[in-house]
Amino acid sequence: MPAARHRAVRRSHWDQPEGEGARTGRTSQSSRGQRNVSGILLNTGMVLGILSILWFSWATYMRWWLAAQVVTPHSSPAILPDGATRASVSPLRFWGTYRPQVYFGMKTRSPKSLVTGLMWMEQGQSVPGSLRHACEQGDNLERYGWLAHDGINFGQQEILERDFSLSTDYVKRPGGEHGGDWSWRIAVQRKHNGKPKVVSLFLYIATDGDGYLEPSVQRDRLSHVDGRTNELGSFRLVFREPVTSGTDQRTPAKYGMLEAPCVGLEHVTQVVQARLTRTTFMDGGESVPIVSVSNRRHVAPEQLGTNSTVVVHQVTARIPFQVEVQFESGSVGHRPGPLAGEAFEHELRRHRAAFNRRFHGVFGLRNKNYSTQDVEVAQAALSNMLGGVGYFYGSSLVASPFTDAPVAYWPAALFTAVPSRSFFPRGFLWDEGFHHLLLGRWDPGLSQEVMAHWLDLLNAEGWIPREQILGGEARSRVPAQFIVQRNDNANPPTFFWTLRTLFPGLGGSLPPADTAFLGRAFPRLRSWFEWYNRTQSGPLPNSYRWRGRDADTSRFLNPKTLTSGLDDYPRASHPSGEERHVDLLCWMAQAAGVMADIARSIGEPHEEYSQLHSVLSDEENLVGLHWAEDLQAFCDWGNHSDAVVLVRERVPVPPGAPPQTRVVRVVRRPSVPQFVSAFGYVSLFPMLLRLLSPDSPRLGAMLSGLQDQNKLWTPFGLRSLARSHPLYLKRNTEHDPPYWRGYLWININYLAAGALHHYSNLDGPYRTQAQTLYQQLRRNLVKNILQEYRKTGYIWENYSDSSGAGRGSHPFTGWSSLLVLLMAEQY
C-alpha cells in the first residue's frame, strides 16, 4: 500500500487537468528563470565587488608608490661617491667661507660642521647699535663684499659702516689629515676725521651637535678654545690680543666671554643678544657705556658637549684696531710657526698676487683698455660669486598630487653658489646654470663638483627641486609660502647650456677625465631630460608648457609662472592646459642637442636625441607653434585677453564699520585662444639660444624689434618687456610690484650679447646689423653696471630701464656677475 500511494501521488502530479498543469509548469519555469537572473546578478556583483577591491587595492598601492617616488633617490649611482667632500678626499676645499648668509664665517663641508663666525656692534651710545651678523639689506651698509677670493686659499672682504670700516681677511695653510690650519685678521678702521668710535667684535665658535669645546681663560680674557669633533679630531682656536692697526702695539680693550647651549645655528644671534648686559669701558680715564656678553646664567655640564654649543669671545676697543684668530688642527705634526703677524701678511700677499695673475690669464682684461678701477670691479664680481659658494645640508620639503601633506626629501648635501647673500642665500636651479658660465672658466673642477651635487638630488622620477632650502640656517631666511617644492614644477634646465661651455669639445673626443665625469652624469642627465619631456609637454606635438602657473585669476593682473624663472612676465591671461610656451620649447631644443653631443662623446646611442633636436629646432616647427605673423614675433599661445586691468572696489562691511576697499582683476574683453601679444625676453629665445639660421627673415624681424627704443632698447641694456605693452611696469597685485615687466636683467642680456656676437660672425644678411647691435649693447651694459657699482657700492639684481639705477636685492653677485664675461667677451 505504501508503494501504491506513492505511485498514485506521482500520477496525480502528471495527470492534472491541462490548464492547471500548464499554469504550474509556466510558474516553475518562471521561478527557475528568476533564480538564474538572480544568480547572474549575484555572480556579477561578486565579480564587480572583487574587481572593485582589486582596483581599490591597486589604486591605493599605486598612490602609495607614486607618493614614495617623490622622496626616493634616483636608482643610478651617485656622481659623487660617499665622502667626496671629506678632508681625506678633498683637503683643499674642506674648509671655506661656506656660510654666505653671514657677513663673515667659516665651516667645513660636512653635515655636522664646526662653525666659526663674526658679529660686531658700535658702542659708546646711550642705546648701543645693532648687532651685525647675518647679511640683511635692512642693515643699510654702505657696501660689503669680497674684493678678492680664489675659492680655495684666501679671501679679502671690505665692509663699510657709516663711520667706520671692517676688513675681514683669511688665509688657509694645508697640512695634516683634517684640512690644515687657517687664520683670520679683522681690522676696524676710521672712515672720517673726528672722535674714534668704540666697536665690539664678537668672535664665536660653535658645534652643531657633534663634539665638544673647552674654553681657556687667562687673566681677563678668553685666550683659546680646545675642542674635538669626529671629523676634525682635536683642534685649537687661538684669539690673539688686539693691536693698533698697522702696528704690533697692544690696544687697550675690554673683554667678554660666553659659553652657552644653542639649539640650532640659526639661533646664534638670539643666544648672544639674550646674554648682553650693560657695563662700561674705561678708555684713557673716560667711561664709555657699552653692552657685553655675560656668563651669569648657569649652564649645566650635561648641556655642554652634547647639544650644540657656542663660545663667544668679545673684544671692545677704540678704533683703529685689529684682531687675529688662528685655527690649528691637531693633526698637523709640524708647522713652521703660527700663521699670524708677518707670516699671515706674507701668505696673504702671495695668494693675492697669484689671484691677480690667474685672473688676467683667464679673462684677459688687460688687453681691453679697462682702467685699474674697472678691473678691480670685475675681480670683486668674480670674488663675490666664489665667496657666495655655500655648503648646505638638510631635507627639502616637497609635495606631489599623491601626498596628503608635504613630506621631507631625503637628507642630502648641496655645494652651490647663491644669487644674493642678503636676500637669496640658498640654491636656485636655473640660477646655478648661469653661475657656472663664469665659475666654469675660473675653476672647471669646482663647476663639475657643484653640478654633481645638484644632479645627485635627482629623485626616482627624474625631478630636482628647483629651490633648495637645506638646514635650519637656510630655512630661517625663507617665507613659509616658498618652502614647499612641488614635483610637477620645473625650472629652466640651464645646466645643459653650462655643459656646452664647460666642455667646448662636446660631441667629439674629450680628455679621459671629462669623459669619465660625463659618463657618471649621463644616466641622471637622461632621466632629468626625460622628466621634462614627460611632465612639461604641451597640447600639440613638439610643444611645451610650464606647469605650476598660479591659477588665481581674480587677484593677479597676470598669474605668475615662477617655474619659468621669469616670474610675472606676461603669459596667457587665463591659465589653461592649452598653453604653449616658446621659451621652454627653446630650452628643450637646446638640451636635446647637448644630450646628443654628450652621448656621442661617451659612446652612448645619440640618434633619439639628435632627431628630437632636429625637430624642435627646426624653424618650421618654431614658426608653426609660435610665430605670430601680424606681430612679427615669436609668442606664447593660450587663452588670452589684453583687456585686463586692476580696479579698486568697495568691500561690503557691517553698518557703522569704516569703509574698506580692495583691488581686484577685471577682464574688459573676453579671452580667446590666441597668441600672447607680449614682445620681450620670451620672444627673443629662438635667437638667445641660437636656434635661428643666420639668413632667417625672423632673425631680421627680431633684431629690428630688439633695437626699437619703444620696445626693448635702452641706453643701459635690453628691458624685459616692450615699453609699448599694456603690462609694462604694471603691478601684479596691489602689493606685488613689477619684476620682469620692463627692468633690465643681466642673465638675459648676457645671452642676448652672446647671440648677437654669434650672428655677427656668421655670413648672412643681418651680420652687420648684429655686429653693430652687439657692440652697442655690450658697451651699454658694461658701462652702466660699472657706473652703478662705483655709485652705490653694489652689483644689483636688476636695473631700471629708464635711469640705469640698480634695483632689487643687493649685493646680487649671482648671474649679475656675468659682467666679467661681458667685459672679457667670453660667450
Image (cartoon, helix red, strand yellow):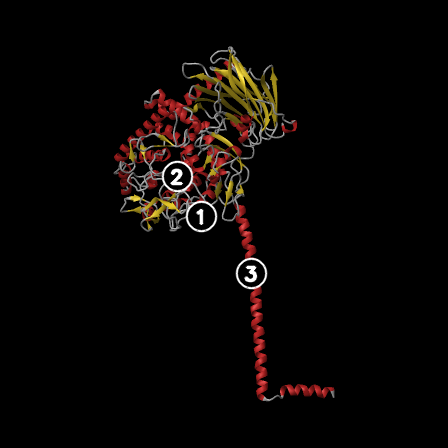
Q: In the picture, which quadrant includes the N terminus?
A: bottom right
Other residues around mark 1 within 10 Å, as few (<14) / some (14–19) / many (≥20) = few
Identify the residue under disc 2: 736
Q: Is residue 55 left or right of residue 596?
A: right
- Is residue 132 left or right of 561 when viewed as pictured? right
Q: How many marks?
A: 3
Within-10-Å neighbours for mark 3: few <14, some 14–19, many 20+: few
Check residue 390 in the rendering and tell me which mark sits there, or answer none.
Answer: none
Q: State whether residue 489 is above or below residue 810.
A: below
On the question of residue 804 being in view, the answer is yes
Mark 1 vs mark 3: which is more N-terminal? 3
Visible residue check, residue 90 = no
Judge by depth and name the residue closer to the eye, 578 or 641: 641
Q: Amino acid at mark 1?
A: Arg
Position of residue 389 measured from the top left corner of the image (x, y, whole percent): 47, 30
Inspect the image, locate mark 2, and give the three-letter code of the amino acid beneath it. Answer: Asp
Give the label, 1 or 3, closer to the camera: 3
Q: Which mark is residue 534?
A: 1
Please give the residue where the numbered disc 3 appears in the rendered image: 51
